[in-house]
Image (cartoon, coloured by chain):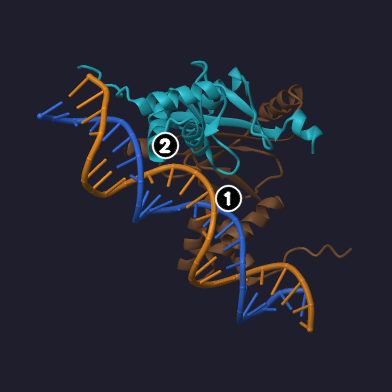
Chain colours: A cyan, B brown, C blue, D orange
Amino acid sequence: MTTTGPRNTRQRRAVEEALHRTGDFVSAQELHLSLRKAGEGVGLATVYRTLGLLAEAGGVDMIRAEDGEARYRLCASEEHHHHLVCRTCGRTVEVEEPDAERWAEQMAAAHGFTDVSHTLEIFGVCADCTASA
Amino acid sequence: MTTTGPRNTRQRRAVEEALHRTGDFVSAQELHLSLRKAGEGVGLATVYRTLGLLAEAGGVDMIRAEDGEARYRLCASEEHHHHLVCRTCGRTVEVEEPDAERWAEQMAAAHGFTDVSHTLEIFGVCADCTASA
DNA sequence: CTCTCTGCAAAACATTTGCAGTCGG
DNA sequence: CCGACTGCAAATGTTTTGCAGAGAG
């Protein structure tokens, strides 16, 4: 078995580089726009498809903003972590909570659930935005 | 001040009753369909508007499924609680985690965030669905 | 070569909004 | 009565898909 893997296309590289450059969460739409502005034209559909593949492969983290829009970011670490998201400017701070992991698993197991995943996000208004409100 | 409050219309009552009857999380679409099937015709827009008002007033809980669809449920208790959601059949189990509350607040405060809220959901496949897979 | 990936435009969804008519208080 | 509430249809915004052509391996 030759572990086919994804093809190394210009578009895929462009998306990964853009994610790397940003370093923070971006929506597919924002990513598409920034690529377009950078001259690296990539179709919107391709951006979605690529992000979907990356997410499935565990290469990126995906969270949902409060309005349901999906936002993606390159996984910095292997460990599952959570986020503190500013409702106003979108800035995110990475936070850890090892207990949550264990808790989620135990809770799921106790109810007979399998194939478990979880989501933990904190939304608020950051210091800067609070000041300029 | 006469605290105007919302009007007691047939539609509003229908939505609240449907939520009460269900007892579990439903999407606006599902709710609209079930009302339609029950003969209690209520416009889809009205369902959305009513759910929005109820959510704002704190009468219902709102969570986002993994695909970003919003789901609503009558608040059973005053306390903030979390959910274990079956990815296959949508069934939810209510779970508690008092520590998460405190942790989220501390974490937010440590980074200067204000007006904090948080989300904690666990997704998995319930015992029944695992069995019939 | 072959088979996956891409682009574009259309489709599919969830949700919101404009407006004219209805009806609760 | 009057203004908030409703229904419908049209508008929005995001994400998905069909299909023909391009390019990686």
Query: Which element carries disc 2, helix, strand or loop?
Result: helix
Q: Nearer the viewer, residue C13 or A119?
A: C13
- Residue drawn at point x = 51 percent, y = 33 percent: A34
Residue B119 rendering spot, x and y as whole percentages:
62, 35
Residue type, numbered disc 2: Tyr
The image quadrant where one finds the N terminus of chain A is top left
Q: Which of the two residues, C15 or B103, is positioned nearer the viewer here?
A: C15
Give the chain of mark 1.
Answer: B
Quarter of the figure with the C terminus of chain A? top right
Residue C5 placement, left or right of B18: left
The quarter of the displayed image where residue C24 is located: bottom right
The residue drawn where x is 59% and y is 64% is B46
User: Is A78 located above or below residue A127 in the figure?
Assistant: above
- Residue B102 in the image, given as x and y percentages of width and height: 72, 27
Residue annotated with mark 1: B72
Instruction: Give the residue pinned by disc 2.
Output: A48
Pointer 2 chain: A
Q: CA distance from mark 1 to mark 2?
A: 28 Å
Extreme residue toward the front, this view: A39
